[in-house]
């Protein structure tokens, strides 16, 4: 087993609950009001973390995982609102780049650029993202089996896809068509919007740690974004997270970041 763990981070309880039962010899730790579960999955040392919602929560959790647990790579799982054309409810997005859509220190710095870094976009680790995308494709091929046809019909999921590209983060829940339209016009290559990924990306860049972000599309970031959100988390997103993460670990793809 590797001496330094892989960190898998979730913003909400529903997803963490989907992964904890698979952890072998789990030990719980509490730091800065956050719960961390250390153990192993499929022969890999793993630490599961509940970050809480928002960029500051994600940044604090990422820093703790690196400094206190010496995590060798971080994977953030969760839900997101779809922005890109063809990104539908029930699809999965694997981030290739992350950007903070609410970062604007202009005119001192260009819009979206993180001050004093010279960059607005943070690249996810290619090997890690490739491996997760491969596992996600296997999961999507089994979606009807994993979710059940009744659930797929209930949530309007049909032939779910895996998308790869830009994911944007900000400290607000985008829940109106007007907000979504403004974001899509300003960042036309953005596939999805969420509240944590770009903050984790910035911390990982500071510490030179590989990271990846895996998101299930729960809504189209519009006026229906609140509908059945908790049920979707429990019955769809948490299932995807459990199956994709376990497939990734089981196929030894995680060793690409050893």
Image (cartoon, rainbow, N blue to C red):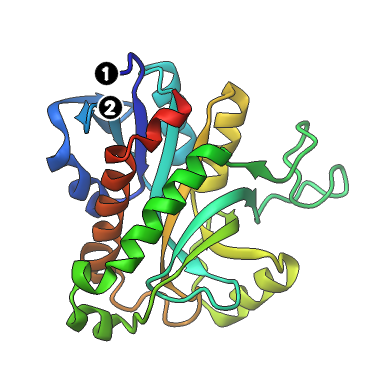
Determine if residue 54 is in view. Answer: no
For residue 1, the mark is: 1
User: Where residue 92 appears, x then y in whole percent?
Assistant: 43, 63
**Could you say which quadrant of the image residue 192 lies in?**
bottom right
Category of crowding for the residue at label 2, using alpha-carbon neighbours closer than 10 angstroms: few (below 14), some (14–19), many (at least 20)? some
Q: Residue at (31%, 40%) from the top-left corner?
A: 251
Q: Is residue 71 above or below residue 191?
A: above
Look at the numbered disc 1 and give the secondary structure of its residue.
Answer: loop
Q: Quadrant of residue 187?
A: bottom right
Q: Are marks 2 and 1 in contact (CB under 8 Å)?
A: yes
Judging by the rendered image, the residue that carries numbered circle 2 is: 44
The structure residue drawn at horizontal position 78% and vertical position 31%, both measured from the top left corner, is 116
Q: Residue at x 40, y 17 (%)?
A: 70
The alpha-carbon separation of the residues under discs 2 and 1 comes to 6 Å
Residue 126 placement, left or right of 135: right
Of the image marks 2 and 1, the number of the one nearer the N terminus: 1
Q: Position of residue 53 (x, y in %)?
A: 40, 49
Farthest-out residue, right: 107
State left or right for residue 172 relative to residue 217: right
Q: Is residue 205 above or below residue 80?
A: above
């Amino acid at each position: 087993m590797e001496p330094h763990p892989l960190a898998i981070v979730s913003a909400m309880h529903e997803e963490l609950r989907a992964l904890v039962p698979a952890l072998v010899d789990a030990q719980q730790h509490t730091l800065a009001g956050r719960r961390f579960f250390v153990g192993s999955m499929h022969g890999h040392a793993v630490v599961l973390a509940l970050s809480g919602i928002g960029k500051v929560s994600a940044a604090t959790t990422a820093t703790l995982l690196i400094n206190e647990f010496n995590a060798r790579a971080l994977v953030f799982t969760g839900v997101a609102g779809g922005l890109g054309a063809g990104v539908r409810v029930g699809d999965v997005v694997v981030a290739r780049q992350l950007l903070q859509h609410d970062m604007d220190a202009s005119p001192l710095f260009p819009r979206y650029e993180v001050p004093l870094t010279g960059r607005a976009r943070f690249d996810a680790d290619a090997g890690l993202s490739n491996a997760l995308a491969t596992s996600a494709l296997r999961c999507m091929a089994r979606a009807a089996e994993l979710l059940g046809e009744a659930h797929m019909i209930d949530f309007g999921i049909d032939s779910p896809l895996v998308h790869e590209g830009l994911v944007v983060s900000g400290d607000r829940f985008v829940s109106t068509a007007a907000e979504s339209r403004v974001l899509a016009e300003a960042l036309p290559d953005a596939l999805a919007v969420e509240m944590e990924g770009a903050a984790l990306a910035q911390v990982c860049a500071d510490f030179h740690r590989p990271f990846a972000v895996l998101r299930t599309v729960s809504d189209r970031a519009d006026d229906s974004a609140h509908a059945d959100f908790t049920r979707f988390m429990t019955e769809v997103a948490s299932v995807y997270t459990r199956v994709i993460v376990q497939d990734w670990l089981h196929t030894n793809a995680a060793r690409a970041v050893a």
